[in-house]
Image (tube, rainbow, N blue to C red):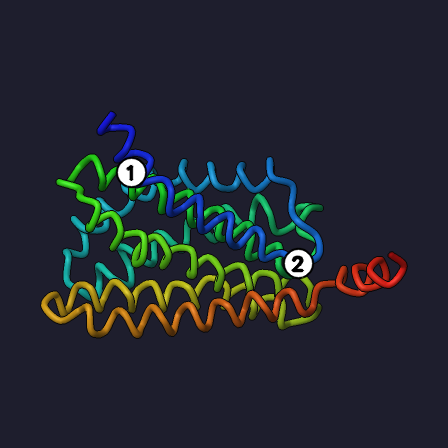
Amino acid sequence: MLIFSILAAAIAPGVALLAYFYWKDRYDAEPLPMVLKMFLTGVLIVLPIMIVQRGLMIWLGDSPFAFSFIISAGVEEFFKWFVLYHIIYNHTEFDEPYDGIVYATAVSLGFATLENVMYAFGEPATFGTLLIRALLPVSGHALFGVFMGYFMGRAKFREGPKVRLFLWISFLFPLFWHGLYDFIMQSVPRSWIWLIVPFMCMLWYRGIRYVNRANAVSPFRLLKREEEVKS
């Protein structure tokens, strides 16, 4: 019974956050099987990420900067971006800017959920530690996914040279914020709480703005209004 309780506590934050961002899609909700597929893809990339990170730690060492921006954020955000670009970017279901956010958060939270489960069973997990992980690393991965998906959505529905620019930003922007998050946690272990709480509030503020912006430019918003007027 205790094992199932720990497992549920480790899985619940990722599922809840995915449901939140899924329901934020105002105009054209994505098919659940496709969203779940991307969530499971996020779970599957955990192992190759761990292998690459282990090799880089042997090669680069574990200095706070190298660990934060290359080994942790660099590798994790690259794998997420890679599967999103090659599986979702040209998919027919990616038909409005907000879809990038849905699928990117699905991948990110699949990764974060398995990572959380591994932590829960690999370390002495308590309700307090799992709650902190839900509020910090799990929600952090969700927000990095929002950033990635938002700019990938902008790339998808633009033309010309800015397409490539937004694709680069969709990788580099979450990498920067993820790396900065890890760097704070690595560099100021005693007083990190005073920095990380306002930092996370800022990330949430920025993430919700991107959610609203992506919804505001949906090509389906006018159709929705017409249906509401007719009804």
Residue, disc 1 = 117
In the image, residue 150 above or below residue 11: below
- Residue 227 on image: x %, y %: 84, 57
Residue, disc 2 = 26
In the image, residue 193 above or below residue 105: below
The type of residue carrying mark 2 is Arg
Report the residue that reaches farthest toward the top.
1
- Residue 93 on image: x %, y %: 68, 46
Q: Is residue 118 left or right of residue 200?
A: left
Crowding at mark 1 (Cα within 10 Å: few <14, some 14-19, many 20+): some
Label 1 to label 2: alpha-carbon separation: 31 Å
Q: Is residue 192 left or right of residue 113?
A: left
Crowding at mark 2 (Cα within 10 Å: few <14, some 14-19, many 20+): some
Report the residue that reaches farthest toward the right.
230
- Residue 42 on image: x %, y %: 43, 42
Q: Are marks 1 and 2 in contact (CB under 8 Å)?
A: no
Classify residue 184 by image quadrant: bottom left
For residue 199, which numbered disc appears in the image? none
Q: Earlier in the sequence, mark 1 or mark 2?
A: 2
The type of residue carrying mark 1 is Val
Report helix, strand or loop for mark 2.
Answer: loop
Q: Is residue 4 left or right of residue 25?
A: left
Report helix, strand or loop for mark 1.
Answer: helix
In the image, residue 159 above or below residue 47: below
Q: Quadrant of the C terminus?
A: bottom right
**For discs 1 and 2, the disc positioned in front in the rendered view:** 2
What residue is drawn where x is 43% and y is 61%? 143
- Residue 59 on image: x %, y %: 18, 52
